[in-house]
Image: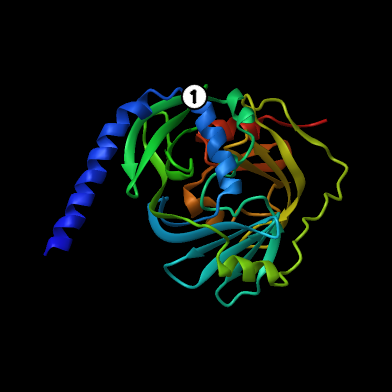
């Protein structure tokens, strides 16, 4: 019985210590941008395992994500816990996908897509053209003290983000994607964070595997150079090649745009040649705009307001 009381006393002492140290934290002069820079570094450098609940387009998915370094390379593992087996492995800048009853395949990518915006681990300076960084309050998530940082859009052409960072490691414990009316579009919530001393065995084994070579998208055979007469501040072209649409396997011109955080995919095809598959319209709650510009159909897809997508699609020009 005395041991039970001792554990209770330790717990009470820990809570009291938390309350006493909060005012000291409040006096720290760490800027919102510095918190985000610490997060970006932590996502690359820390070794950790998180259990996550992801809310996306009204679908709830439990995930496990593990990150570490093996032979001085970043290695990560993502597993979806519901439905048919599905996982992804990143070794360096190559991400391999393993899906039920499908052959594995790989792509070149610096982050595993589908868990956190890749820009969280990128150059925070790049985000300043489109977002204002603002410190929020402090809270407790996954049993750990956290600091809220808001990324507020400087215009109406993109959505806002808010992220709660673990005060010990600067790793994200929650992130929300919000409209300007504060409507929640996407949320990721960490329910358990384990900070590791070394890379776990699953990452060591992943580093040893002979994964498929990364798929290389075909270069455009056309000499047409697509440009945009208007893009929101901070957005620029990242990729211009050919993609095959999911659902009908038709090859179309593809342009990837990004402001460092929000990503927009633009598909271009001759009118009537490549009908848009239904899956592209509905999956992941993406906004979509389809416009006819001259003799081509331009489809813009991304997690930004539909008005932004429409304006981008209509601004396509040939130089």
Is residue 75 visible in the rendered structure shown here? yes
Q: Is residue 230 above or below residue 146?
A: above
Residue 6 in the image: state x and y as whole percent.
18, 56
Residue 245 in the image: state x and y as whole percent.
66, 57
Residue 124 in the image: state x and y as whole percent.
60, 32
Q: Quadrant of the N terminus?
A: bottom left
Q: Is residue 199 above or below residue 13?
A: below
Mark 1: few, some, or many residues within 10 Å (few <14, many ≥20)?
Answer: few
Q: Is residue 37 above or below residue 113?
A: above
Viewer-closest of 2 and 173: 2
Residue 314 in the image: state x and y as whole percent.
65, 32
Q: Quadrant of residue 290?
A: top right
Farthest residue, direction bottom: 101
In the structure shown, which secondary structural element does the residue marked by tag 1 occupy? loop
Tell how many labels. 1
Is residue 290 visible in the rendered structure shown here? no
Asked if residue 49 lies left or right of residue 207, the reply is left
Q: Quadrant of residue 24?
A: top left
Asked if residue 97 lies left or right of residue 178, the reply is right
What's the image's color scheme? Answer: rainbow
Q: Is residue 14 above or below residue 151?
A: below
Viewer-closest of 203 and 271: 203
- Give the residue pinned by disc 1: 31
Asked if residue 25 lies left or right of residue 260, the reply is left
At a point 64% along the width and 35% down the height, the residue shown is: 123
At a point 18% along the width and 50% down the height, the residue shown is: 9
Q: Quadrant of residue 69?
A: bottom right
At a point 47% along the width and 64% down the height, the residue shown is: 80
Q: Quadrant of the C terminus?
A: top right
Farthest residue, direction front: 2
């Amino acid at each position: 019985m005395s041991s039970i009381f001792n554990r209770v006393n330790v717990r009470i002492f820990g809570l009291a210590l938390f309350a006493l140290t909060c005012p000291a934290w409040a006096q720290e002069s760490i800027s919102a941008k510095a918190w985000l820079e610490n997060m970006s570094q932590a996502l690359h450098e820390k070794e950790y395992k998180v259990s996550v609940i992801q809310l996306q387009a009204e679908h709830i998915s439990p995930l496990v994500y593990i990150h570490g370094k093996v032979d001085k390379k970043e290695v990560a593992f993502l597993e979806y816990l519901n439905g048919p087996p599905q996982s992804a492995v990143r070794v360096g800048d190559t991400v391999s996908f393993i899906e039920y009853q499908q052959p594995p395949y790989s792509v070149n990518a610096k982050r595993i897509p589908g868990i956190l915006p890749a820009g969280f681990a990128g150059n925070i300076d790049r985000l300043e053209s489109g977002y204002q960084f603002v410190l929020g309050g402090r809270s407790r998530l996954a049993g750990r003290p956290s600091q809220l940082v808001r990324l507020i859009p400087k215009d109406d052409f993109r959505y806002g983000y808010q992220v709660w960072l673990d005060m010990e490691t600067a790793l994200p414990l929650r992130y929300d994607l919000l409209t300007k009316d504060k409507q929640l579009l996407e949320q990721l919530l960490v329910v358990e964070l384990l900070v590791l001393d070394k890379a776990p065995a699953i990452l060591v084994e992943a580093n040893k595997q002979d994964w498929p070579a990364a798929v290389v998208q075909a270069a455009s055979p056309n000499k047409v150079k697509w440009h945009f007469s208007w893009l929101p501040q901070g957005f620029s072209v990242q990729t211009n090649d050919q993609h095959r649409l999911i659902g009908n396997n038709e090859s179309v011109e593809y342009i990837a745009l990004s402001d460092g955080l929000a990503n927009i995919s633009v598909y271009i095809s001759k009118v009537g040649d490549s009908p848009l598959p239904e899956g592209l319209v509905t999956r992941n709650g993406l906004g979509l705009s389809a416009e006819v510009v001259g003799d081509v159909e331009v489809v813009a897809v991304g997690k930004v307001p539909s008005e932004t997508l429409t304006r981008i699609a209509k601004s396509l020009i040939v130089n």
